[in-house]
Amino acid sequence: MRVLRRLRLPARHDQLAHFAGAAAEAAHAVGLSDLYADRLELAVDEACANIIDHAYAGRAGEIEMEIVLLVDQALVVTLIDEGLPFALPERAAPVRPRDAADAPIGGQGLHIIRASVSEARWEPGVVLADGRRVNRLTLRRDLPPRRGGAA
Amino acid sequence: MMQLKVKALKKVDIVTVKGRVDSATAPEFDNALKGLQQEGRHKLVLDMSGLDYISSAGLRALVSALKAAKQHNGGVHLVGVSDKVRDTLEVVGFQSLFPDFESTLDAVDAF
């Protein structure tokens, strides 16, 4: 396991590009395709926006992000906040609307997160080793199998 | 960072959006589109050739503009959509809602 990046910034919308950009940068650094890097950027952006809007909901706070490489396995982004635990709906918004009238306004963020990574796991109200009670969101992008492995 | 520019033609408005439309900038994007529509301008061409990124907050503004436009016999035509932005539209299943043109001229002519 190798820590690629740690970032701790105010939970504000104007900081989203820093979190999302760091995730995309890490994805490129470990050789993920543009598509996977773009999707991870999107998932981190949407996840941080959810934390700002629902966990902190107007209150000041911070988001901590850690990006870890599990060698030959996955890139894992962990987001931690000290806001209120918030429930996420089990099902994301319906997709593929037939026309404009059928298209939902909003509710796409959660669907985007789930569709953009290999695994997304929410753990509201977990207690860390340092005693803090936090919300933890883990986004995992599995790495593609390496080519030309041992015969 | 996001930059917006609006060029009014006789019946169509061309909105050029550049940079990043996320939760921080989407309100400005949404307000610009709503402002045009409140003036009765419902045929919109969005030039996205300089758009680097759009999140669900930006998509919300797009769908909201499309719904209002359709109610007034208008529409929202896209130009210069990058692979990255197209992928985001596809993730949420919105790609078929927005006609996508190769040039601004084609997008304007299609109204």
Image (spheres, coloured by chain):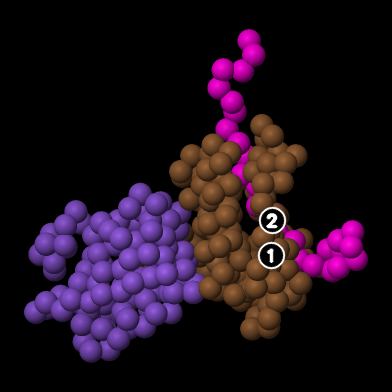
Can residue B102 be seen here? The reply is yes
| Chain painted brown | A
Range covered by the magenta-colored residues: A126-151
Q: Is residue A119 left or right of residue B55?
A: right
Secondary structure under the numbered disc 2 in the rendered image = strand
Q: CA distance from mark 2 to mark 1?
A: 7 Å
Position of B90 relative to B1 (above/below): above
| Chain painted purple | B
Same subunit, labels 2 and 1: the answer reads yes
Magenta stretch encompasses residue A85:
no
* Chain letter of the residue beneath label 2 in the structure image: A
Q: Is residue B79 left or right of residue B21?
A: left
Q: Which residue is mark 2?
A: A6
Query: What crowding class fits label 2: few (fewer than 14 Cα within 10 Å), some (14-19), or many (20 or more)?
Result: some
Secondary structure under the numbered disc 1 in the rendered image = strand
Residue B31 drawn at (x, y percent)? 36, 83
Nearest the viewer among A74 and B93 is A74
The part of the image, by quadrant, that contains residue B45 is bottom left
Q: Is residue A76 left or right of residue A105?
A: right
Position of A52 relative to A75 (above/below): below
Identify residue type, mark 2. Arg
State yes or no: discs 2 and 1 in contact (Cβ < 8 Å).
yes
Q: Which residue is mark 1?
A: A8
